[in-house]
Amino acid sequence: MKKAESAIEKILSDHFHVSPDRAQNQPIYDFGFDYAALLGERDAANEDWRKLPAGDKARYERGLPDFLQERGVENPKDLQYSRAKNAHLVRQEVSARISEPPFLKALPLGRIDYQSSLAELAESVENVEQIKSLYRLRKITSGSTKNAGISSDEAVKLKNCFSQGRELYFAGCGGSLMVKPLNHFYSATAYSYGMIVLNNPIRYSKDNLPSSHGMIYLPDVIQCQFGGDSPSGTFSELFCSFPTQLIRNNNIEFTQDCTSSIQAFQTHRINVSIGTLLSMLPEMSNYYSLMTGRRSRAFPMEVVNANNPRMLTWEFQIGDGTSLPTRDIVERSFAGFEINERFGKYIVSVPAVRASEIRALIYSDISGRLSFIENPFFPVLLPEICTHFLLNHIYSCIMRYRPDDWGNVILNEVSTDTSLLTRHYFANFERKFLLLVLRCLSRYTPTVSLGDAV
């Protein structure tokens, strides 16, 4: 029994450690090199060559290559610039998303039957032409020509990933909690392949993705490790697939630039426990506080138009009037913006034209209500779908490698609080997962209307 109690303590613990300066052994991005300038130099040299008289061109034995070598112009396609090219493609996509209106359509669903609607929408994505269309929609810089995007063969692979993800999700929903985590983790993994190809600016094919999970399970402390010099794989690719986040509620919508978060992910190794991850989820807020005696890291947030006649300005109102995140994380999340405290809330004034610059971690519940997350991993901003990926990975590892402890947890034989919190998490996950999936790979941002009768 003592062994089970020890495991339970670790499951509920709020432990995390961020190790900066732990750079990837083989980083994917180089944000420090100006690849755009290199392209500009190459284009300018090509134009000069085009204008060069034929007599002058004859002086160069190999033609253009010798001319470029004489001018000292490097080849952007050289392998040494591959990481800089990746960073350039990310910046290019981010710039396009910020400069254009959000391309995803808001889709309110009735509260009574929203889960049936989500299932129908998820199944509707499993279509080859639809997937090819979504690729061009979600990757603005993929090109608008007829042949731009992915092939039908690639779309078929993603279609099968989506079908498998959906079937595994429903198998998990219908199965016992004794085996539920494994089905849900594999469902998240299958969907992740499609999310990566449809969103990641540098990924075009499922077959070229790393085969590992992209994070490490630490069994002795029941934690997971990711980022920095941790192995790359599905999780790291999924994280880097969201260089922007669409922040939307009834009053406002804007696209947040998360490039610096991806850059930080390459250099920060993070260890985290289940308790810490649960504390970040808005739907778990009340149960988490009651079961653990610790406060949640999710704080209600409203965004409203400020009374500023000179320019369109939004007020980010953080807190519920009685509980606030630490001022330090608010200041880091909104560096460079005016922060005041009024009526028991932090009030941050952000000009609308600069909204993309904020570095706040913002989640929303199924109805679209926003929460400011007191981010334990700053400057790494963990997308909500990634938080659930990590949770289901850790839970599935406990289930597989410590079946005795897992049984004690879910069968309420050791700790009522642990059992209840675990069950509450999976109940919330099953209500929200398909909604998150659709936000990450469809043309919609579904929300559940609060106006319907329950």
Image (cartoon, grey):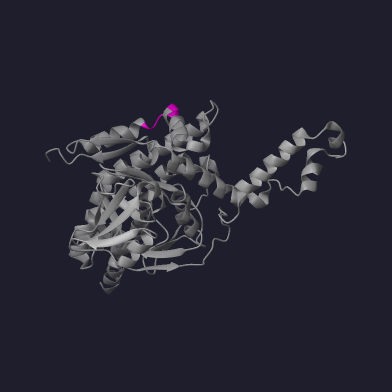
Residue nearest the observer in this picture, 3 or 310: 310
Q: Which quarter shows the C terminus?
A: top left
Residue 412 higher or lower than 57, as above or below:
below
Is residue 411 in view from this perspective? no
At which x and y percent is residue 251? 26, 43
At which x and y percent is residue 244? 42, 47
The quarter holding residue 56 reads: top right
At which x and y percent is residue 257? 43, 49
The quarter holding residue 380 reads: bottom left
Residue nearest the observer in this picture, 54 or 161: 54
Q: Which quarter shows the N terminus?
A: bottom left
Residue nearest the observer in this picture, 97 or 54: 54
Q: Is residue 382 magenta?
A: no
Is residue 341 in view from this perspective? yes
Residue displayed at 23% across by 36% down: 109
Residue nearest the observer in this picture, 39 or 130: 39
Residue displayed at 65% across by 47% down: 38
Q: Which residues are magenta?
A: 125-129
